[in-house]
Amino acid sequence: MKTLTTTAYILASVFITGCSGIQSTNEPLKVLIVDGQNNHTVWPKSTQMMKQTLEQSGRFDVDVYRTLVTWKGGKLLENFPLNDGKVYRDLPQPQTDPAFKPDFSKYDVVISNFGWKAAPWPESTKQAFEKYVSNGGGFVTVHAADNSFPEWKAYNEMIGLGGWGNRNETDGPYVYFDDAGNKIVDDSKGGAGGHGKQHEFAVITRDKAHPITENMPDTWMQSKDELYNRLRGPAKNMTVLATAFDDKKFNGFGRHEPVLMAITYKKGRVFHTTLGHAEPAFTSSGFTSSLLKGTEWAATGKVSL
Ligand code: ZN
């Protein structure tokens, strides 16, 4: 199996990104990042980092649409700072923002940087989003966005697998790989979502035929990150593109867990990455390269980056 070191992969991805920026004659793809309720210390900086990564490639123009942020006393806070360096993870239980009504139809692809315990979107916004993806819109779910909205059936079909939020066997099977490289669909009972200690880990490409992964190394190293385990969900029309081994020595479960997935939902395409817990993850070349490829694929069905 071919293994590329982190340094070699940085060089490779810089080369790919640099070339595509010069050679591309396409109009930039229009990206909308939605966020506002995320349990991670790196948020809201993570949204700014992804916006920068996408725009520096020359392939994307990025807008951000943020909910009002629930603040002390349950108040919704306006003009929440994009990045002021403070820690916002201990916010109270987020509340639905009735004014959260992005016009999804203006965009080629929507990226969710929502997280655990995000409050449901307004009903009309949920319907508009379902219509957008059903009609061929692209969607990218990053890290804890697969914790969000356990009760929203269409959303769970879009993301394929999810975790936390009382998800269990009624939401769908566990999906993982065994040591021999077989995909296991496991209906056994139990909760969904977890992770061991953060660490660097190798990501193994499992599908070299898919546009997102066809030019990725067979194995690459992800910077220190959370490795999500025991995700479960409908897993319909879902291709596991890459996995990582959830080593028991880091309190894992000894399975090869999906980290990159591609899902089709009606006419829409969804790219799901479980990577992206903290700042080192967002700056790693494996994360940025897969985000660029996955976002372009979700938007167009092809990858030029
Ligand atoms: Zn996390």
Image: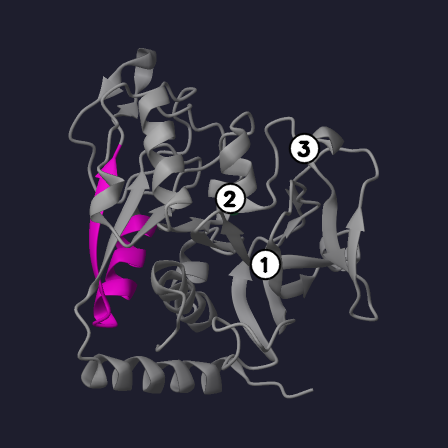
**In this rendering, does residue 251 appear at all?**
no
First in sequence: mark 3 vs mark 1: 3
CA gap between label 3 and label 2 equals 13 Å
Q: Secondary structure at mark 3?
A: helix
Q: How is the image coloured?
A: one colour
Q: Are marks 3 and 1 in contact (CB under 8 Å)?
A: no
Range of magenta residues = 46-66
Looking at the image, is mark 2 or mark 1 nearer the viewer? 2
In this view, 17 is above or below 92: below
Question: Magenta stretch: residue 281 in it?
Answer: no
First in sequence: mark 2 vs mark 1: 2
Residue 104 appears in which quarter of the rendering? top left
Which residue is more in the foreground, 221 or 176? 176
Residue 190 appears in which quarter of the rendering? top right
Reading the image, the residue beneath label 1 is 259
Reading the image, the residue beneath label 3 is 171
Residue type of the residue flagged with mark 2: Met
Residue at 31% in and 57% down: 50
Position of 8 compared to 171: left or right?
left
Q: Is mark 1 within 8 Å of ligand 1?
A: no
The location of residue 88, given as percent across then percent down, is: 35, 34
Looking at the image, is mark 3 or mark 1 nearer the viewer? 3
